[in-house]
Each structure stands twice: as structure tokens, then as C-alpha cells.
Amino acid sequence: SLKKMVLKAILEDTYNLMKVIKRGREVVSGSIAERICDSYKQLSLAEKETFFNMLVSDHGVAETTKIGITLDRSNPVESIQRLQNLRHITQPQFAGLFRVLGKAQGGVKFMVNMRTDLSKLTGKSTVEATPAVVPVIDHELKQLLSVWFSSGLFHLQRATWESPSRLLEKVAASEAVHPILGWQDLKRRVGAYKRCFVFTHPCLPGEPLVILHAALLENVADTMEKIVPALFEHMPDSVEDPARVKVANFYSISRPIDGLSGIDLGSNIVRRVMHRLQAEYPKLQHFSSLSPIPGFNNWLFGQINRHLQHEVFARILDDVRPESSDLLPLFSDETHVKMMQLFDVDNNKDLYTKLSMTLESQEWITSPVLVSELKQPLMKLCARYLFALKHRGHALDPIANFHLRNGAVMYRLCWQADQSPNGLSQSCGMMVNYRYYPELTEGFSEKYYFTKRIPVGEPFASVISIEPDSLPLDP
């Protein structure tokens, strides 16, 4: 069939291109590389899976080699040369193929799309070898893309109603946090008292890599109910009153390209937007996000299930400091007693079972009693998740890590901030204000990067009984 012919052609071209690369003649490889790109696009996902497995099995390691080197600190030049030679030897052969494909016409976009295909194979493969192959190839692609997408080359532009329709369509399609409902809604999102900023990169011209939405309000918003009405309060063509622009509330930050997930796009995304806004409104000094906590419920239900499975139902302390284990009890003694009474149970198994069922049903949000009684324990647990849980020393929550790397302060945990079904299923309706103080962002960013320390505001600190950072007073 035609499909089999295409697969056979790409395999043959790959073998030929690898021969050219090994001979150091990459300069004559352009036409072959473009044929491989064209053929790959015609493959089904299953055929792409065959291609990936072939790359690792046939173009992974040249031959069985035992590697050993000695590094001499007194002779740094020779030691570095040995390391460079070792790097060349230990790199998979197909890494050279990826570098050549990236230089082809449209090659970088091709590599980004290839990484997207890899993610589709995770957990869905029908070939036994693939689960091990996917992370091996993804590692090499991620390394290359991290170099190509240098944050220093990002171009920042504001999207307005006069922007090209293609860009506006991408902005609308990429908004997953607060979906844009038609052209009129989009016109409001880029109109008066709103800002939509788009980051693009020369490697993918015209493709938004990061999209940031902001609402220019008079106060820091602690619920979506204070931001969403603002999206409809003013006509898109209204004239802005500078006296009403006191706080820039960042309510949506998205990265629409799946193939760049996990790629570090820099730690100054928000700071660049702040500088842009201050150039427009020099007196604007207050910046805040109202951010979701997408992983909290998954973590919480996981903890409940682990306690149930292992019958670990201790009832101690409210400690949420970084040294606390994620297997610590969920509630303090006093809270535990109240929860038993609230759910009318006399044993831990029934308590955690009822708690899990209640939170999953989302009906608890309609009960004033449950909303009141669950507020303190859920906020403490969420504070533990945000402040204490780490990945390689940094905040486990990816949105928290993003803002902290940009120099923000974990300022306030907001109760009942997003009562939509999505907000309740992600984090029991809680959200976070990450505050940005222009004169402190760079210092906080550097301190977080090097010391892993999370700066907190007084409202957040009060939830977990720790000392807040010294911050400028609000007006």
C-alpha cells in the first residue's frame, strides 16, 4: 500500500542520512532531511511508533564500548577535551539526525510536532519496546528545543482587535482556563481595561508560545467573580480612565504548544509584561495573579487513598513545613474530632470515605455548613501542598513554580475563588494570589532559584503559622 511505501521510504532515507552524518558531510544532507520530514507527516501514529523504535534500535549506539576516562585537575584543558570527546561518544547517534532535521525548511516546527507525537504514545503503545523508547527520544528532543528556544529571543507583543485575524484565532483557541465564547467575548478580552500579551519566537514565527491575559482593576481580585464581570463591565472601545487602573490582575497564562511542554521558557515572562504595562501607566505599582491549583485534588485524593489502604489514621499536628512527610495525618487532633462529628462517623475509615465522596460529588459547595466547616482543614492541606511539597527543591505545583521563578510572592490562598465545576474538581474551588512587587521581583527570583526558599505574604503565612516576608504595604 501507499502507506507502507512511505514508511519504507522514510526508513531508507534515514539510513542514508545517518551515513552522510557519520561521514561529516551534513552540508549535502538538506534534500534528504526535507524528504524525511515530508514522509513523516504522512505516517499514522502507529507508523511513527515504528519509526521511533527503529531510531533507538538501529541508530542509538554504534557498537558495544567500554568507556573510562581520567580527569586531571592540574591539567584542565586536557581534561575538558576528554569530557568533550566523551560527550560525543556517549550521545545517541540519532541526536545528530535531529540536529540536521532541525536545520531543514520548517525543521524546528517539525521537531516540536514530533515531540507532540511522542507524548501521544505515552501509555497508549501497542509495541512492547515503546514505553522505554519514548523517554529516551524525548530527552534528546527536549535538550535540543531547550537550546533553540532561548528566552532572550522572545518577542513580546500586545494582541488587540486590530491584530491579524490568524493571531486572534490562536489566542481564542488557546484559552483553556477561561474559555472565550465567540468573537464578541474575544473583543472584550483585548479591549479597554484588558490586556492580552503574546510571546513569539523566531524559531516558530507567528506561533504564540505564551499568552498572558490581564484585567486592569482598582483592587487585587481574590475570586473569579471579581474578574469575570470586569470582562463585561466596559465596552471594548471605551476610553480608559488612568485613575481606575491601580492593579494589573493576571488571570490566565497559557502555553498552547504541547511539543514545548517542560521546556524552560525563561524566568522573566511576567516581568517583561510588568515593564510593558508600567511604560503605559507609570504609576501602576501593583501586580497580582489569581491562579488555579490544578494538582491539589489529585494529591489530596491520593493521600486519602493511601491512608485508607495502609490504615494510617493518626491525628497529629498542623505542621506543613518543608520537612513534613506527605504521609503525615491530614488533620490535627481538634480538627479530626470536628470532622468525625461533621460526617457523623465513629471510625477513620468511614470518615475518609465520606470525605472523599463528598468532595468528588461537588454538592458540598451548596451546603453552608460544609463550606464553613471544611474551609480551615482544606486550606491547611492546600497550603501544605503549595508550600511544603517539592520537586528537586522547588515547588511541586507547576504554576506555583512558574510564578516563584518569575519573582512572585505566594501571597494569599483564596477560598471559594472559582466555584465552577472545573475549579471544584481541581482544587475544591481554591486559587492563589501570587503578588509581584516591581522592586523585589528580581531578588526573589534569584533567591528562589539558588536557595529554593518560597517568599510568602502575611495572609498565606497565617494559614500555616509561619513568619511572612517583609513586603511593601498596600495603599
Image (cartoon, helix red, strand yellow):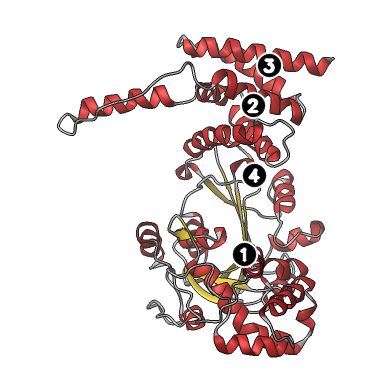
Residue linked to disc 4 = 257
Residue type at tag 3: Ile
The residue at the point 55 percent across, 61 percent down is 397
From this view, report whether residue 202 is shown above or below residue 461: above
Residue 61 relative to residue 128: left or right: left
Of callouts 2 and 4, the N-terminal one: 2
Look at the image and tell me whether residue 119 can be seen: yes
Task: Give me the C-alpha separation between circle 2 and circle 4.
Answer: 21 Å
Asked whether disc 3 touches disc 4, contact meaning CB atoms under 8 Å apart, the reply is no
Indicate which disc, 1 or 4, sits on the residue closer to the N terminus. Answer: 4
Residue bearing the label numbered 3:
10
Left or right placement of residue 84 versus residue 42 in this view: left
* Mark-to-mark CA distance, 3 and 1: 43 Å
Q: Which tag is nearer the camera, tag 1 or tag 4?
A: 1
Pinpoint residue 234: horizontal percent, then vertical percent: 72, 72
- Of the numbered discs 1 and 2, the one sitting upstream in the chain is 2
Q: Earlier in the sequence, mark 3 or mark 4?
A: 3
Which of labels 1 and 2 is toward the front? 1
Which quarter of the rendered picture does the N terminus lie within?
top right
Q: Secondary structure at mark 1?
A: helix
**Disc 4 residue type (three-letter):** Ile
The answer for how far apart the CA atoms under marks 3 and 4 are is 26 Å
Q: Which residue is mark 1?
A: 299
Q: Residue at x 78, y 13 (%)?
A: 5
Judging by the rendered image, the residue that carries numbered circle 2 is 52
Given this view, does label 3 or label 4 mark the residue nearer the observer?
3
Amino acid type, callout 2:
Phe
Towards the viewer: 411 or 77: 77
Which one is earlier in the sequence, the residue at label 2 or at label 3?
A: 3
